[in-house]
Amino acid sequence: QVRLIESGGGLVQAGGSLRLSCVASVRTFSNFAMGWFRQAPGKERRFVAALSWNGFRTQYEDSVKGRFTISRDTAKNTAYLQMNSLKPEDTAVYYCAADQLGDGSYYLREYEYWGQGTQVTVSS
């Protein structure tokens, strides 16, 4: 069983930055692809960014390209989502997810484990 705990959400003004963290309670963290997804009120959960298990491949949803960066620190069992130039439309609950030996998919169904989410609110 893998437990994921997100943190780093909050309220920020448009144009500001936040860094989300996702700590995984697993021995073989380096064997997991990590993904970030978000869900705005009344909308479906959608892909934001992903990193393959070997760290070689990243994917981003088009609206966050050039503004968000996914990364990980295997020594700390932690994945990150650096979010810059935030916009009000980035407001959502952000979830991290883990996919053992995954290639960093944008499909929710590929991820076996999910965190509880952290709220990000961007004011205009």
Image: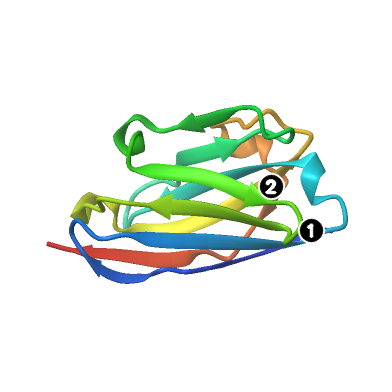
Q: What is the x, y in percent for residue 15?
A: 19, 56
The residue at which mark 2 appears reads as 98
Q: Secondary structure at mark 2?
A: strand
Quadrant in the picture for residue 68: top left
Quadrant in the picture for residue 93: bottom left
Q: Secondary structure at mark 1?
A: loop
Q: What is the x, y in percent for residue 111?
A: 67, 41
| Vertical position of residue 124 compared to residue 36: above or below | below
Q: How is the image coloured?
A: rainbow
Q: What is the x, y in percent for residue 8?
A: 47, 69
- Which comes before the other along the chain, label 1 or label 2? 1
The residue at which mark 1 appears reads as 2
Tell me the crowding category of disc 1: few under 14, some 14 to 19, or many 20 or more residues within 10 angstroms, Cα based.
Answer: some
* Amino acid under disc 2: Ala
Viewer-nearest residue: 12 or 95: 12
Is residue 41 left or right of 55 when viewed as pictured? left
Q: Residue at x 48, y 61 (%)?
A: 20
* Amino acid under disc 1: Val
